[in-house]
Image (cartoon, helix red, strand yellow):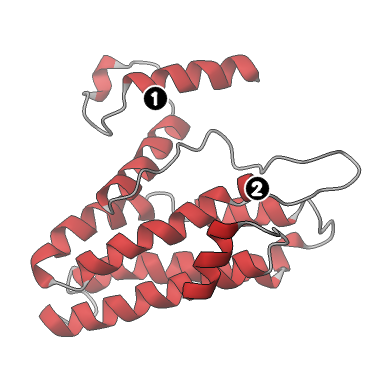
Amino acid sequence: MWILTFITVIFLISASDAFGPHMSTFPTVTKSTILDMERRTFGNVFGTSVAVVLGANPSVASAKEFVPTIDSVKQIYILGMTLDSLGQKVADPETFEDALVGLRAFNRDATFYPNYARNFISKSVKNNADGDSRVGYIREAAQVIGSCQELLEGRQGLEGKTAAKEAVVRVKKSQALIAKFLAKSGVEGDEKINAFVKSH
């Protein structure tokens, strides 16, 4: 497994400019690698350097007892932070296209964050982790974020400043849901998470 991870890291370093090289240059690219690159595009478009995800399973402190840490929820935290920049872009009709680049990349793998949250929760909740309210927060946040694509494309009956106002509301709602997840994640004493929860 570590060999596959190492190879993936080497590939992603060589392709550090998301979607820069033509895919034909890399004949062994997998669907998983492409989705990882698209998540990088989503984060980079919104102005935050997003760590590439090499696996959706959070790390476990031990086989006996799972102790949540910032590393356990880092992708959810990073998503919440990237939404600051998305909020700025959707607030101005002049930058809708910039926002749509990231939103389209996000929607190509819209289940990633709910799955990540479920895998995290399953470390401590052995029965029906998928039904845990914390997973529900991230599932709803992902749906709300994804809905901004149709909104900005004019497919929900709103345009211009009216669409911008609604998009900002949705971004803030998503961040509030992410903050609820982080607040109830069990991660204690982390200043970055505490600051995010307090501000949203």
Q: Amino acid at mark 2?
A: Ser
- On the image, the x and y values in percent for residue 46 come to 28, 54
- Identify the image quadrant of residue 103: bottom left
Q: Is residue 96 visible?
A: yes
Q: Quadrant of residue 81?
A: bottom left
As shown in the figure, which amino acid type bears the numbered disc 1?
Answer: Leu
Mark 2 residue crowding within 10 angstroms, few (<14) / some (14–19) / many (20+): many
For disc 1, the marked residue is: 12
CB-based contact (under 8 Å), mark 1 and mark 2: no
Up-down relation of residue 6 to residue 160 (above or below): above
Disc 2 secondary structure class: helix
Q: Position of residue 10 (x, y in %)?
A: 44, 17
Q: Nearer the viewer, residue 85 or 25?
A: 85
How crowded pointer 1 is (Cα within 10 Å; few <14, some 14-19, many 20+) is rated as some
Tell me residue 199's x, y (percent). 47, 74
Q: Is residue 176 left or right of residue 167?
A: right
**Count of residue discs:** 2
The numbered mark at residue 76 is none
Residue 157 showing in the rendered view = no
Q: Quadrant of residue 107?
A: bottom left
Q: What residue appears at the point 68 percent right and 69 percent down from the top-left corner?
A: 184
Q: Is residue 129 above or below residue 179?
A: above
Q: Earlier in the sequence, mark 1 or mark 2?
A: 1
* Quadrant of the frame with the N terminus: top right
Q: Secondary structure at mark 1?
A: helix
* Image point (17%, 74%), residue name: 154
The residue to which callout 2 is attached is 72
Q: Nearer the viewer, mark 1 or mark 2?
A: 2
